[in-house]
Amino acid sequence: MPALTDWSRRILQAVLVMAGVLLCATDAFAHATLIRTSPADGAMVASQPDAFSLTFSEPIAPLVLRLVAPDGTAVTLDRYVQRGPTLDIAAPAGLKTGTHVLTWRVVSDDGHPVGGAVVFSIGAPSPGVSAAAVEIIDWPVRTAIWSARLVIYAALFLGIGGAFFMNWIGGRSRSAARLGMGLILAGLVAVPVSVSFQGLDALGATLRNLPELVVWRTGFATSYGLAAQLALAALAMGLGAFGLKGIAGRLLSLAALILTGCALAASGHAGAAPPQTLTRPAVALHAVGIAFWAGALVPLGTAFASRSSDAAVALRRFSVLAPFAVLPLGVAGLLLAVIQLESLQALWTTTYGAVLLVKLALLVPLFGLAVVNRIRLTAPAERGEARAIAKLRCSIRAEMALILVIFAVAAVWRFTPPPRVLAVIGAEPASVHIHTSAAMVDLSISPGRAGPVSASIVIMTGEFGPLDAKGLTLILSNPAAGIGPIRWPATKPGDGTWRVDGLTLPQAGRWSVGMEILGPDGAPSELAGEIDIRP
């Protein structure tokens, strides 16, 4: 196939840089997110808890659970009961006084691992102990995952799509077949390697651990393992379809195309979104449509470049069939975007939405080129007009460049939590524990995001005893945003907690918290802390 034009190459380079920026800007967590813990993060408890509880935004499977003691020693927690998205973990006996760090690493239904830590103290905090074990992004592993996914997309969509096009529509040429088989061979290497990268990500390991058997076993144990097996079967069939003609080649390439859709629907946040009876078929349909369209470009480009007599016939057939593939592709993509976004605002307020906007920005010129090709160039090219053929070849090269960039951008979604997950997280309360020798306060703001909220407050003595306060005032301020301090008197409705209703927090970010407590003897005491409010 002719080399990319300078214009196409510049587009490819510029947007790959943009994809890299998005990759680096994504959140450090994947798509199952911790939304509630017991003990709460930062909590102070009077005695050792019998169990720990972790509740996530969607069902998960535990990978590694550890408890780091105040002296730095760690013990693996292997006794737990799973109830949907909640893990109930048995606590080891004999926990010491001080600050403990519960580290966890799990994998969600969409096959994406995530890890983190919960810090709590028994009796009194330990000086200098913090959530140092919280997940740190391993950029070499993340880059390897992204790179492997890009190769797999090219193999599935361009390789298998090309095999389908040449067997069903035409444009069969030696150079197109060589390129298609080369992409598929690269995919046959990239798929199992990507499973090992999945295992590294799941275990929080580094590239140095790649040869270890446990890494590969862990990768195949996730839902991505099934997707990889389906992808390998699809690629093997696609490779075989290049060497066959007639009905055998057609059936094998059709089976490879269908398996491509099944592989991409078996794992990933789009297919895992409810209702899966709708989203998984939509992902499969979207993938098949992409393979049909993208797979046609290499055979068509090489056919016109070699001035093959079959080029005009292949172009005519493709132009007739293309709308029947592109329309379902667009409808399925729109449906998945609506399910994942849940609101139009998420387009510009989330990383997932930013990736989608970049993809949409690239689709506009791509569809524009397709329309120009169909309306202005197809008929003249079929008649053999040299000028139209030259323009069509240039347009096909530009389409190829745009599609490769779209693959690169779409691969970034592996690292971005969809807004539907963020909405679940946003509905959860934000909390803070403040402890002094005079008093102790547990503040919960629900929901824990900017906007209308209510506050629930539990107060005790510094020794965990009851504190029958005469009055309580909540003070909130956000110095970075120039807000406050604002004072709200709390009321005690009779359930043992203090409440402040009708609050509005106009700005997300870290807020300063103040508590003025009027004790039973009328003596005032003040406590101060900070609380994080989500967007």
Image: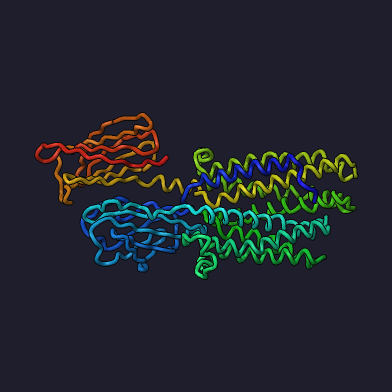
Q: Residue furthest left?
A: 521
Q: Identify the residue at horizontal 43%, vertical 48% (top origin).
A: 424
Q: Is residue 163 visible?
A: yes
Q: Going by the image, does 482 lie left or right of 442?
A: right
Q: How many numbered marks have been drawn onto this rendered protein structure? A: 0
Residue 268, position in %: x, y?
55, 56
Q: Identify the residue at horizontal 59%, vertical 63% (top origin).
A: 193
Residue 238, position in %: x, y?
72, 63
Colour logic? rainbow
Q: Is residue 278 visible?
A: no
Q: Going by the image, does 135 lie left or right of 2?
A: left
Q: Identify the residue at horizontal 52%, vertical 57% (top origin).
A: 110
Pick whichever, 248 or 106, lies toward us: 106
Q: Going by the image, does 522 lie left or right of 507?
A: left
Residue 66, position in %: x, y?
36, 62
Q: Is residue 532 above or below residue 267?
A: above
Q: Identify the residue at horizontal 77%, vertical 39% (top origin).
A: 372
Q: Which image quarter holds the C terminus?
A: top left
Q: Residue furthest bottom?
A: 213
Residue 134, position in %: x, y?
40, 53
